[in-house]
Image (tube, rainbow, N blue to C red):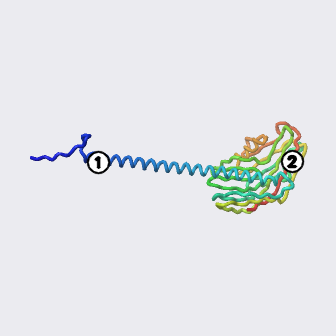
Amino acid sequence: MRRTRTAETSAGRTGPDRAVSDVLAFVLVFAIVIGSVMLLSMTGFQAMTDYSDGEQLRNSERAMEALTENFNDVLRYDGIDKRRGELSLREGTFVADPDGTTLEIELDTGAGTAPADASPVTLGEFAYTTGSDRIVYEGGGVVRSAENGGSVVLKRPQLACDEGNESVLITVPSVQANNGSIQSSGTLEVMMNETDRKTQIESGVDEVTVTADTDYDNAWNATFERSGWERDTASATPKATCGESTGSDLRVVITVVETNVRY
């Protein structure tokens, strides 16, 4: 009886078996390569997206701080009643609101405690929103807030308690604006105009107390701590006192600048 023999390769395996093994190896290697490329693409794309979002947030913070520095000239100098600046929105939203944080300022002259002439002061605000973060101008400072209610002060308002020199200096704007918002990918021009300025100067003050009714508790607490005030940690809202620890006679200057923001 005649038998047919299958030719063997030099490695001792049959030709068809080796062909199947080569195909399986190629498929496995190809699948690993494609899977690795897809995994790297997904993680790399996410990393690039996160980096882009973070960089946009940092750019927004710097832009708002620069705008704030420009606008605060209206607060610092009597001879300057108008400032304008530009903000690149990059698909973000800009909104101005005449409400926001309210400051209550009380003066203790030894004969009793009384509100300051301009108290309470509604600061108003304008804000740039990108993603889940808001960069807010209020009180002459800049605050970053998140959807979870957290907030960080980026630039402090001008509330200085200097007990060593027996002085308190409070200079804040009260922003008036329409409740309108604008979203754009381009550049927005923003203008601030002074409409009124009120200054109160007092000498011989024992204590000054400031209470902030605000959505940005963490930011205002940090502002008080970094500006020389003695914070009332038992208060449910941000509250601080200047002069309590020394009992010195303080010279107090409180300036409230009413402004209008247009864009």
- Observer-nearest of 224 and 232: 224
Label 2 neighbourhood size at 10 Å, few (<14), some (14-19), many (20+)? some
Identify the disc placed on residue 75. Answer: none
Q: For the residue marked with disc 1, what is the amino acid?
A: Val
- Up-down: is 259 above or below 158? below
Query: Where 96 falls versus 17 (above or below)?
Result: below
Image position, residue 191 (x, y; %): 76, 60
Closer-to-camera residue (38/256): 38
Q: Check disc 1: other Cα within 10 Å, few if <14, some if 14-19, many if 20+.
A: few
State the image coordinates of residue 160 (x, y, percent, origin top left): 81, 44
Quadrant in which the C terminus appears? bottom right
Residue indicated by mark 2: 253
Mark 2 falls on what kind of element? strand
Query: What residue do we see at 82% from left, 39% from top?
Result: 244
**Residue 5's spot in the image, x, y percent?**
17, 45
Q: Which mark is residue 20?
A: 1
- Cα gap from disc 1 to disc 2, whole angstroms: 90 Å
| Residue 230 placement (x, y as % from top left) | 78, 40
In this image, 92 relative to 168: left or right?
A: left
In the rendered view, does 27 fall on the left or right side of 164? left
Picture quadrant of residue 182:
bottom right
Q: Which amino acid does label 2 sit on?
A: Val
Closer to the observer: label 1 or label 2?
Answer: 1
Q: How many marks?
A: 2
Q: Residue at x 64, y 60 (%)?
A: 185
Q: Which of 13 and 202 is in front in this view?
A: 13
